[in-house]
Image (cartoon, rainbow, N blue to C red):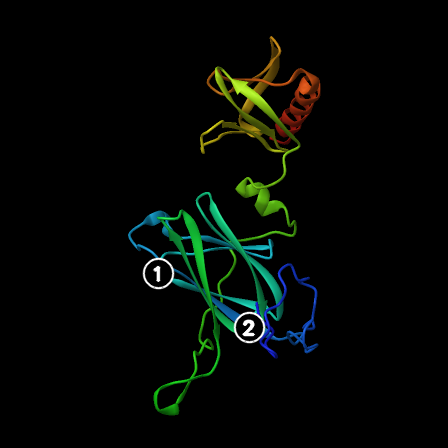
Amino acid sequence: MNCPKCGERLPDGISTKLKFCPVCGDRLFEDGEKYIVQIFVTGNREEKSGGMLVFVDDREMYETKVMDSIYISLSAGFHSLKFRQKIRSKSITLLVNCDYSIKASYNTLSSLIETSVTKIEDKAGAGGVVEHVDFSKATIATPSMVSSDERAFDVMLGEDDPEFEMNATSGLVEGELKIFSERLEFSPKGQFKKEVINYVNVDKIRKKMGSIDVELGGNVHKIYSIPKDIYNEVLAYLTNKISEVKRKK
């Protein structure tokens, strides 16, 4: 990000509450102004899963389709945007002091989400004629989901912080077990996949020869061996959480 006045690059990790450039001292944005941000996802239109989820300030979620644009209205100032496709995500911080166009795409070679951010301003075209990208007729998108809790989307995406994290084994498979407030996750070593069990799907949980036996519907059992020093604490936590979920059903 650069200062709109002096053009100097703003320091990495700059406070998003800052209103004045630390280099020239000029205002970075005018309070109360509104701007439009166009988000355009590129890729293969035929790929049904090619669209992305876009999260704004961890408060609003928008859904996009490949080769289609959505337009969102943002107040002047700093905003965080997260682009999510399947399990891949990318976050950027944007200083909004004019209209923007953002192109987002999933790079199949690097397996990363790439974004290209362009300011929309008056630009001199051929023959000195001033060209302007007009967003005045753009239809502002309605968020698919709004949350007042900043952690809500992290929970939905499985990116919240675990209550417990430990080495564990499931059968003969070694891996890492993470215990969250709504689910548990087992990730085998050397594998990208993970096994996720939501507490709402658990029928019972019990001790089994020093292991935790998680019983699901259809008499399916998932058994995890965990360290002895944390065994009783984890078992009590899971028992209480699953009972709490059942009371709410």
Instruction: Looking at the image, tell me whether mark 2 or mark 1 is earlier in sequence order.
Output: 2
Determine which quarter of the picture holds residue 238: top right
Residue for badge 2? 35
Classify residue 120 as left or right of residue 184: left
* Residue 79 pos. (x, y %): 60, 62
Q: How far apart are marks 2 and 1 (CA)?
A: 22 Å
Which residue extends farthest top?
209
* Residue 132 pos. (x, y %): 43, 82
* Residue 243 pos. (x, y %): 65, 24
Which residue extends farthest left?
46
Secondary structure beneath dot 2 equals strand
Q: Which amino acid does label 2 sit on?
A: Tyr
241 vs 22: above or below: above
Total numbered circles? 2
| Circle 1 residues within 10 Å: few <14, some 14–19, many ≥20 | some
> Where is the N terminus found, in terms of image quarters?
bottom right
